[in-house]
Image (cartoon, helix red, strand yellow):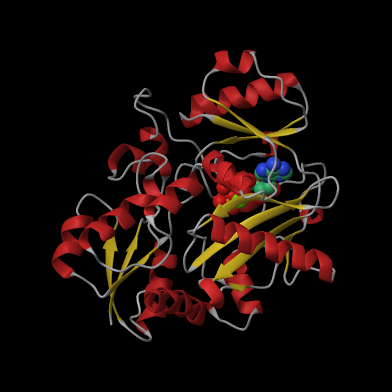
Amino acid sequence: MDVALVYNVKKEESTDAAATAQPSSPEQHATHTQTQLSPSADAFAEWDTIETIHAVRDALSLRHSVTLIEADEQSFEKLRSSRPDIVFNIAEGRFGASREAQIPAMLEMLNIPYTGSDPLTLGICLDKSRAKEILSYYNIANPKFAVISSLTELLSLEFPVPAMVKPLFEGSSKGIFDSSLVHSAKELTDQVTKVIEEYGQPALIEEFLPGREFTVAMLGNGKDLRVLPIVEIKFDSLPQGVNPIYSYEAKWIWDQSSNPLEIFECPATVDDSLKTAIEELCSNSYNALRCRDWSRIDVRLDKNGRPNIIEINPLPGILPKIADNSCYPKAARMAGLNYNEMLNAVLDAGLKRYTLL
Ligand SMILES: Nc1ncnc2c1ncn2[C@@H]1O[C@H](COP(=O)(O)OP(=O)(O)OP(=O)(O)O)[C@@H](O)[C@H]1O
Ligand SMILES: [Mg+2]
């Protein structure tokens, strides 16, 4: 088959790239009211490195003829003229809360099959509050929350602490630092201010879930949906004295491939009832949000030991090297799928959905 891999590539240096490159930092365009934001340390965290893009290309090339198309202003024309049999979509998109939906929306217009979730699901999952509203409708446990768009709104809010303060529509731990767990009204105000000002978007304030944390890789659709072995995030591996959260520092600074943290345990040590509860929670969420082909779902236990959904990632991170400590490939490996097999399994799930397989 002719497969087009559509992607966004991480620029080398955020400052250089923001000044010179197209595309520029997503935050710079996150809101129309903000003219120019200086790029934050994590500005490019969600885009893929050229190493990842090449690894995905090489995996799919084992069985198909693969072309690369960067997700930019030329994508539509390139897709229209090349008309691949299917697109393998890993594009994070550009600008705003619906950015992940951009390429899938183009592909729907062109009637070209593609892997992964549709624009609606990608948009909803990136806006964490919209995803939580849907989960709540289906009685799927998730932490209590408030969305604050302006500092005036904050004045009338009474939210119990400890709480987590996060940008409303980011991923890859962007905007989630050790300081995002707040223990006082003052800290809460400071963090909300930081999110609104630095990320140019509303802040999501959430009840802090104090229990164990897991992340769960999902593969397939309908009756073929597989919950891959559960990964636990072990916070005792973090430097002493820091908060038990999987922050930007934990993901990108304290954990280096040259000196990896022993932060994951896969399969997680969980008893049968907790395992079943997590698997059911994740399957129900995947289906409620109408995810397709694959996703990675973050789960944390509340004070009563009950699993709750933190967020759903319909475009999971897939760093290729084992030392990169990427959770979806790790769970797949534990299920017996190496990196290449994992990516071809995702493609096959998509092909099957379109009855192309
Ligand atoms: N309500 C919460 N209670 C406890 N911890 C939380 C909560 N929300 C977030 N966290 C912590 O912060 C981390 C990052 O939050 P979240 O998963 O929402 O961000 P993200 O940037 O979208 O993540 P990813 O890197 O998986 O895309 C979680 O893995 C968890 O450790
Ligand atoms: Mg997460």
Residue 345 drawn at (x, y percent): 48, 79
Q: Which quarter of the figure is the C terminus placed in? A: bottom left
Rendered residue at 53%/62% (across/down):
295
Report the side of 183 relative to 89 (left or right).
right
Report the side of 163 relative to 156 (left or right).
right
Spot the residue most to the left. Answer: 81
The reply to whether residue 259 is visible in this rendering is no
Up/down of 187 relative to 299, above or below: above
Up/down of 124 relative to 151, above or below: below
Residue 314 drawn at (x, y percent): 50, 58
Up/down of 37 relative to 131, above or below: above
Up/down of 91 relative to 13, above or below: below
Is 345 or 276 nearer to us in this picture? 276
Rendered residue at 23%/72% (across/down):
84
Tell me the quarter of the picture where residue 148 sits. Answer: top right
Residue 86 drawn at (x, y percent): 30, 72
Residue 226 drawn at (x, y percent): 60, 74
Rendered residue at 46%/75% (across/down):
343
- Circle count: 0
The reply to whether residue 82 is visible in this rendering is yes
Is 314 or 59 nearer to us in this picture? 314
Rendered residue at 50%/28% (across/down):
198
Tell me the quarter of the picture where residue 223 sits. Answer: bottom right
